[in-house]
Amino acid sequence: MASIRARSNKWQARIIRKGHPTIAKTFLTRQDAEKWARSLEIEIDRGTYINKSYAEKTQFKEILQKYLNDVVPQMRSAETQAIRVRKLMKHPIAEVNMAQLSPKHLANYRDERLKVIKPNTVIRELAILSSVINHARREWGLHIENPVAMIKKPPMPQGRDRVINNEELNRLFIQLEKISTWYKPLVEFALETAMRRGELISLLWENVNFEKSVIFLPLTKNGDSRYVPLSIKAIRILKSLPRDIEGRVFPLNKGTVSILFLRAARRAQVEDFHFHDLRHMALTNLSERFPNILELAAISGHKELRMLQRYVHIKAENLVCKLG
């Protein structure tokens, strides 16, 4: 049975059970202390008791800080993730006690963020919060339900379908050539291979096999390696490039590639076209040559066919001839 004792004008309830750590909590009245002790003993007897002492004495920002220190440095995108976690630590939700963190807190966070940023960014932020909480539950003894899993996520926005015509592409190439030697071939190569920006910028000559007409990517966004087949045009582009002393095929700064691309697009009067849209265009074109979606996924590196469908935009009029 729990012991109840007066302590500094308050009442402390203490429960000592074999196989359980000592549990103690202080209340303003003896009645509250006894009520808490009885309910807790019932939970222990039923085997439903969960020790929330760690959660009760920990703020969300402390969990985020520990995640930032212990987990983020091991991630491939550590720098980007660190920026995101630090930003979350500045939000008022970080001040909430973990034992009190509820779906309502997360729903309010979601609704507030949707007023200032796009749904896909909110989805990404919620995914980070969920990952932090789940890691703390698995590794650090944080015994709470994950409130992120209990709220409705914003609907995924429809995939972009911006495809430019040859005239726009030629105007874009003229502007890209003014930036440096590398930008036009980079874009041409992206359109031939459907490779991601990061894969293109980190590509090394040692991973290019001209004999087999393939590129080996040892580590991709989803954590796997893959081989990318090269078309005749892709090989011609590679062979036209000068060799960089560092061994990179495209010795460009990853952080500025998209910015300079947007600048060139504006100067070429190609509106609403981003570097990432090149992958959409490439996969749409490749889908005509590779109607087997599994073959297309092998080229693109998509694990989920649902995500691949968001990239590929097949026009209905192009399917009419197949109907007979």
Image (cartoon, rainbow, N blue to C red):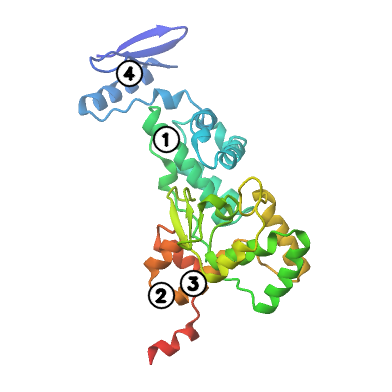
Q: Nearer the viewer, mark 4 or mark 3?
A: 3
Q: Nearer the viewer, mark 2 or mark 4?
A: 2
The kind of residue tagged 3 is Leu
Q: Nearer the viewer, mark 1 or mark 2?
A: 2
Image coords of residue 112 (percent x, y): 59, 49
Q: Quadrant of the N terminus?
A: top left
Q: Is residue 94 visible?
A: yes
Helix, strand or loop at label 1? It is helix
Q: Quadrant of residue 2?
A: top left
Helix, strand or loop at label 2? It is loop
Q: Which residue is mark 4?
A: 34
Q: From this viewpoint, which residue is outermost toward the left?
A: 46
The kind of residue tagged 2 is Pro
Asked if the residue under mark 1 is in contact with the one under mark 4, i.e. CB atoms within 8 Å, the reply is no
Image coords of residue 316 (percent x, y): 48, 83
Looking at marks 4 and 1 on the same chain, the residue that comes earlier in the sequence is marked by 4
Looking at marks 1 and 2 on the same chain, the residue that comes earlier in the sequence is marked by 1
Residue 5 to residue 279: above or below: above
Q: Which residue is mark 3?
A: 286
Label 1 and label 3: CA atoms lie apart by: 39 Å
Asked if the residue under mark 2 is in contact with the one under mark 3, i.e. CB atoms within 8 Å, the reply is no
Asked if the residue under mark 4 is in contact with the one under mark 2, i.e. CB atoms within 8 Å, the reply is no
Looking at marks 3 and 2 on the same chain, the residue that comes earlier in the sequence is marked by 3
Looking at marks 4 and 3 on the same chain, the residue that comes earlier in the sequence is marked by 4
Q: Residue at x 53, y 70 (%)?
A: 232
Looking at marks 1 and 3 on the same chain, the residue that comes earlier in the sequence is marked by 1
Camera-side residue of 70 and 107: 70
Label 3 and label 2: CA atoms lie apart by: 8 Å
Dot 3 crowding, Cα within 10 Å, few <14, some 14–19, many 20+: some
Q: Which residue is mark 1?
A: 135
Q: Which residue is mark 2?
A: 291
